[in-house]
Image (cartoon, rainbow, N blue to C red):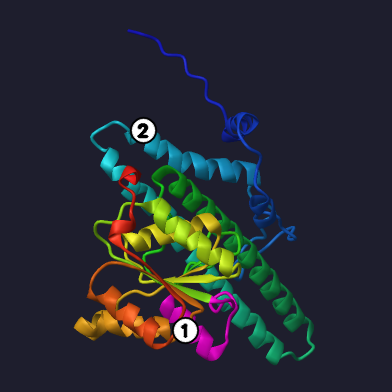
Amino acid sequence: MTNINRSVRPFCDIAEFIAQETAATTDDFHAAFASNLEGIRIGRGEEEMATDMPDPQEAQLAVELIVTTLFDVLRDTRLQPAAERLAWGIVNSFHHVADQWGAQADKATRDVQDLLRCADGSEIHSVELEQARDTLEFLDEATDALRCMRDYAADVFHTETGRPWSAPKGSLVSSKRTASVIAATDFLAARRLRRNEAHSPQGPVVIFSGGADCWFDERLIWGKLDEAKARNPMMLLATTAQDKGCDAMAAAWAASRKVKLITFRLSAKLGKRAGFVRNEQMVGLRPVEALVCEGSGLQSHLARLVKEKRIPARFVRLSDQKWEAQ
């Protein structure tokens, strides 16, 4: 029988070795994994935890290894087509847990507010308030760290697949993310209420729509969007949020250029009217510019709307594509 000698090394040693061969830890990880807390209790009666936050370098490398190893193992095998879906699920797991911890932080905020409202000056109340504040700070720090890991996992996913990762529904907002993706419903509600800059970013809106089929010239689409950004450096990009074709190219461009993306998805409740209502909502943003690529009747309808509203517009035809781009 063959004897196999294995040398087991702790992950911190592996991380240090990889770090020497690769780029340094990003500033985002150093910022997200910093902590002002020496110890924290989570919940009543629990013992204080005096442990530190994870090492930012190890955290960054762990995230990268989780995603890239999956692609490496499945590449050139029968399971290669499954790699992207599995990796998407990994990023979504980070996203889901970060959302859960964010919700706990929101509840902790309300707890602190309640304690402040009923302050009686007693020592017991002061202790409870101090513990509640520590819990809130801990949850805020932890949520930032989890979001940072999610954002980096999304960046690795983008590098491996050439497509930006996007959440299955709702908004994905993070100052550290390559491109914030804001659901149109959140964006419109925030505009009405002016409740949160993260969900209601300020800036000139450029609306974009295009067909899902027969489009392959990414350089053409990116070039048109680069021209729009040159005219509107602080632009927000609103798209019709299709998963392929022109909209997918536009989403990848937004991620690359760090432009905030507003996604207008179809509402199933509106039936056949959904696409036309969506076009009206996009035009209702009072965009400074529109970019419409040839597609279906919905793109023709949007083109008519922007002309009626006298919105500066650029129209791109399928025939404008370069065949060498295939």
Is 305 placed above or below 71 here?
Answer: below
For the residue labelled by badge 1, is the local secondary structure a helix, a strand or a loop?
loop
Which of the two residues, 105 or 2, is positioned nearer the viewer here? Answer: 105
Q: Position of residue 207 (x, y in %)?
A: 43, 74
Residue 55 visible, this orientation: no
CA separation, marks 2 and 1? 46 Å
Q: Position of residue 22 (x, y in %)?
A: 60, 33
Magenta stretch encompasses residue 103: no
- Which quadrant holds the N terminus? top left
* Quadrant hosting residue 70: top left
Residue 173 visible, this orientation: yes
Is 324 placed above or below 217 here?
Answer: above
Q: Residue at x 58, y 76 (%)?
A: 203
Amino acid type at mark 2: Val
- Which quadrant holds the C terminus? top left
Q: Nearer the viewer, mark 2 or mark 1?
A: 1
Q: Position of residue 257 (x, y in %)?
A: 54, 57
User: How many labels, in total?
Assistant: 2
Give me the disc on residue 285: 1
Which of the two residues, 297 or 58, is positioned nearer the viewer here? Answer: 297
Q: Residue at x 54, y 90 (%)?
A: 193
Query: For the magenta stretch, what is the residue range?
Result: 183-204
Give me the disc on residue 73: 2
In-image side of 98 versus 248 (left or right)? right
Give me the disc on residue 17: none
Q: Residues within 10 Å of mark 2 (few under 14, many from 20)?
A: few
Amino acid type at mark 1: Leu
Q: Position of residue 119 (x, y in %)?
A: 73, 90
